[in-house]
């Protein structure tokens, strides 16, 4: 009788932490970026993940005022000359672009111009000086590709993406889709950016995006549940042992 009680908790005591470790490991493994791109390859080019580029904007005095580290992928629909219909095209932004832009008290812009592709992508960030919060408020894209029936142009000036706090950087490891217009969305990969209050040409403390936090939450919840289970088994074992001891005494 006592032997059963001794063996059982010993087994569980070893296996549960193992299960816990396995689950946690799996949970964190999904957080790490998977190198797979979109599963349904678009008909044309660039189906793979974009490389991460480093883009920066400098003040007139030469110090960095906007800093961004991210992979960008455009998803455009346009009227194709060669196919004589509207087509959907994926295009990766080159990571080695020279970026440009401007920094003002409560707006900061980042321009990514790809001369050869006749593509001009602009991000505008706004800072609320009262709440000390910033966000991506405006994205515009112009493109004049050879296959376009007419030059492409899309803009949305009322966006609310990539929210952060002055002095901190915004971070999102997970892939995120920014819907700009019916004809344009942008997929972002492994983003860290800071449009205001950059000091010493470096990012401030990172504020993780909701997508990343949700991903971290799953292993934490599973871990807590398993820890609870271990505790219950341990209590049951202790209570059981007490009872069996009591049993011996009465006999
Ligand atoms: C591009 O946008 C279209 C239409 O919104 C969508 O169906 C498709 O999945 C998108 N492709 C990628 C790779 O994001
Ligand atoms: C790109 O767009 C921005 C904002 O629309 C504009 O200020 C800039 O001059 C453009 N650059 C080129 C090379 O067209
Ligand atoms: C700035 O933030 C304050 C406080 O949250 C808010 O009341 C105000 O409307 C915001 N201003 C703008 C221009 O969004
Ligand atoms: C701008 O983006 C927001 C959020 O994605 C969307 O609700 C709105 O319809 C867009 N406006 C235009 C003009 O496309």
Image (cartoon, rainbow, N blue to C red):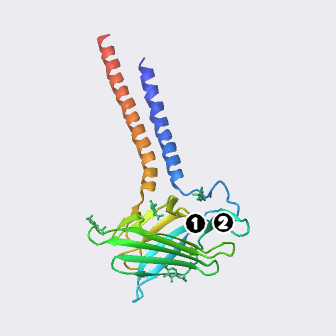
CA–CA distance between discs 2 and 1? Answer: 9 Å
SS at mark 2?
Answer: loop
The answer to which of marks 2 and 1 sits earlier in the sequence is: 2
Report the front residue among 132 and 238: 132
Mark 1 C-beta to ligand 1 under 8 Å? yes
Specify the quadrant of the image occupied by residue 164: bottom left
The foreground one among 54 and 228 is 54
Residue sitting at 51 percent across and 54 percent down? 31
> Which mark, by number, is residue 143?
none
At 27% from the left and 67% from the top, the residue drawn is 131
User: Would residue 227 be found to the left or right of residue 186 on screen?
Assistant: left
Residue 126 position in % (x across, y down): 37, 72
Q: Quick one: label 2, few (<14), some, or many (20+) residues within 10 Å?
A: some
Residue at the bottom extreme, as displayed: 61
Task: Kindly state the secondary structure of the residue where label 1 is placed.
Answer: strand
Mark number displayed over residue 73: 1
Circles 2 and 1 in contact, beta carbons < 8 Å: yes
Image quadrant holding the C terminus, namely: top left
């Amino acid at each position: 009788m006592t032997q059963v009680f001794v063996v059982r908790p010993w087994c569980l005591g070893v296996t549960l932490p193992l299960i816990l470790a396995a689950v946690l490991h799996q949970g964190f493994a999904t957080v790490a970026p998977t190198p797979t791109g979109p599963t349904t390859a678009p008909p044309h080019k660039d189906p793979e993940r974009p490389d991460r580029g480093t883009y920066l904007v400098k003040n007139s005095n030469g110090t960095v005022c906007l800093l961004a580290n991210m992979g960008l992928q455009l998803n455009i629909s346009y009227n194709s000359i060669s196919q004589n219909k509207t087509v959907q095209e994926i295009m990766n932004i080159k990571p080695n672009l020279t970026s440009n832009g401007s920094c003002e008290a409560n707006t900061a812009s980042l321009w990514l111009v790809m001369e050869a592709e006749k593509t001009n992508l602009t991000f505008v960030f706004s800072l609320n000086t009262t709440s000390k919060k910033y966000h991506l408020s405006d994205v515009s894209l112009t493109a004049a590709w050879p296959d376009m029936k007419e030059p492409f142009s899309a803009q949305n000036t009322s966006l609310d993406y990539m929210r952060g706090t002055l002095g901190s950087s915004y971070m999102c490891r997970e892939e995120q889709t920014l819907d700009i217009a019916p004809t344009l969305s942008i997929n972002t990969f492994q983003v860290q950016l800071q449009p205001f209050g950059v000091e010493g040409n470096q990012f401030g403390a990172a504020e993780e995006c909701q997508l990343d936090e949700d991903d971290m939450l799953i292993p934490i919840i599973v871990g807590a549940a398993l820890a609870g289970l271990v505790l219950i088994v341990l209590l049951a074992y202790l209570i059981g042992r007490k009872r069996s001891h009591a049993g011996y005494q009465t006999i």
